[in-house]
Amino acid sequence: MIRTVAMLVCSAVAASAAEPVLIPRPTSVREQPGTLVLAADSLVLAPPELIDSAVATLSAAAACTLKPAPAGSPGRIQFLAANARPEAFPIPQGEGYVMRITPDGVNIHAATPAGHFYGLQSLAQALTTANPPRTLACADIVDAPRFGWRGFMLDESRHFTGITEVKRLLDAMASYKLNRLHWHLTDSPGWRIEIKKFPRLTEIGSRGSETDRRKDAPPQFYTQDQIRELVAYAKARHITLIPEIEMPGHADAAGLSYPEHSGGGFIADASAGKWPNFTFNPAKPETLAFLDDILTEIAGLFPDAGVIHFGGDEVNFGWQHWTDLPDVKSLMQRENLKDLNGIETWFNRRMAASINKLGFTTGGWDEVTARGLPRDKTLVFWWRHDHPQVLRRALDDGYQVVLCPQRPCYLDFVQHDSHLNGRRANGFNPLADVYGFPDSLKELRPGDAPQVLGIQANLWTETTVTQQRRDFLTWPRLVALAEAAWTPASRKDYAAFETHLKVHLPLLRARGLAPWDPFAASLEVVK
Ligand code: ACM
C-alpha cells in the first residue's frame, strides 16, 4: 500500500536519483558511481534483536519478500558493527550510522542498536521512494542526530486518543527518527491512566472530555496492561514514553474523583465554576501520600523513562483558596512560608524529591525554574515563547532544557492564515517556522548547547474532537520538527524539505494518517 502510493508520486515528482528522498535529511550524502538493483529475494544480515523487524520493514518498503541470511552467510543488506566500516569513514557513535550503497549491496554500520535502527529507517525510506522499484543510486551516507531529545507531546486529557492511534503515531514517529513521546496523561478534563490503588481516578475521572463534560460519559483511559503494551511497542521503535502526571494544578479530574485531596480552583474568577478542583491540596499529608503512591505506580509502569514530568504550570490559575485550608495554614507556620509562591515552591520541592527518590529526573514546565529544584535532577520544558527571560534563567541556573515554545512548537496553533479554528498569539505556526526552529531562536548562545537536550512539538487537544483533526494539526508539521531535531543546521534547506515532503505526504496517507496538504491548500479540518 505504501509502495503503490509512493510510486505514483515518484513518477509525478521525479524524485532525484542522486540523493534518496530521506526525511530527516542526513548529515552527509556523497554520491558514488553506479546503481544497486536489489533482487526481490535478497538476504538480510542483522543482529538477532533486529533481524525480524529489518526483514519485515525492508520487505514492505521494497514490496518484495526479503529473507534473513543463514548463519555464516553474507547478506545483500548487512547491519554491521561500527568498527567494521572501511577506513575512509568516521566511526559512528550513539544513534548515528554510516550507510554505504554500492552495486553489490548495502552495508549499515552503527555502534548501537539505535544507530542500526535509524539506518534501517533511512534504507526503508530510500526503498519506499525508489524509482524504479528496488533501484538505488550508490551513495555513502554518514548520519547522526543534532539533538538527543526529539520529541512530541500528546495531550490525552482534553480528548483521548487510544491505543490504535498511538501505535500509528509511534510508527510514524520512528520512521522520522523522533525518540520521545511526552504523554500528557492527566489534566482537568480527564484522568487517562489506571492507578490500581485509586480506582476512582478512572471510574470517575476518566469520564468526559473538553467537549463532553457529562458525568455519565463513557470512561476513556489506558489500563496498566495497555500502558505496558505501548511502552514495549515504543521501546521496540527506540522511542521513550515520558509520563506526565500534572500537579499541583490542572488536577480537576483527580479532585472530582477524590474530593478530599482537592485544594480548590477557579470558583471566584472569570472562569467561575469551570474547574472547582483545579489544584491538589499542597499541604495535606494524606494528599502528599496519595500523590507519592500514584508516582510509585507510574515509576513501575515506565521503568526506562528516565523522566517523570509533574507539570507545575499555571498553578496561579487556581491557588486562590489555598490559604483557607487548615493544612496549608499549619504548613505556612511550620515552614515559615510567606505567601502562595512559597507554598508552591515547598510543594514542588516535596514532590520532586519523591520523583528523584524513585530514581527519575523531574520534568516540569518552565514555571519550575523559579522553584529551586535540584539542577542535576530536573529537566525544564520551556514553553512560554513570550518569556524568553525564563529560558535564559533556566540556562544560566544550570538546568537542562527541552525547547518547546508556543511559537512555533505548539501544534494546536493554526498553520495557515486562512484557518479559522485554533490558537494564535501575535501570529501562528506555519510549517516553515517549525522547520526553522531552533535556529530562529535569538536567546541561545553557543555555550548553551550542552544544556539544550533537544526540541519538541506539543499537541494540546482542546479543539481536537476527532482523530482527523489531531492528524491535521500534527502532520506534516511534525515531519518538519523531526528534520529540525535531527539534521544539522548547516544541512537544513527548506526548499529541499518541501520537495521531499511532496513525496512523503502520500506516505503519511498510506500509513492511515490524514495530514494537511500545504501544497494543495487542502480544507481545514475544524473539529
Ligand atoms: C502549557 O501550555 N500550559 C504548558
Image (cartoon, grey):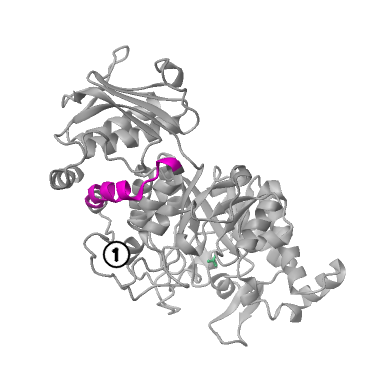
Task: Please give left or right for residue 59 compared with residue 240 in the image.
Answer: left
Front position in the image: 182 or 434: 434
Q: Quadrant of the C terminus?
A: bottom left
Q: x%, y% of residue 131? A: 16, 36
In front: 31, or 414? 31
How many numbered discs, if any? 1
Task: Look at mark 1 in the image and give the residue it sits on.
Answer: 468
Amino acid type of the residue that numbered disc 1 sits on in the rendered structure:
Gln
* Residue 439 is inside the magenta segment: no
What's drawn in magenta, residue-wise?
Answer: 490-506
**Near-viewer residue (337 or 164):** 337
Q: Residue at x 35, y 27 (%)?
A: 99
User: Does the image show residue 130?
Assistant: yes
**Image height check: is 315 above or below 132?**
below
Query: Is residue 498 part of the magenta span, yes or no?
Result: yes
**Displayed-image quarter of ligand 1:** bottom right
Tell me the residue at 57%/60% (across/down): 245
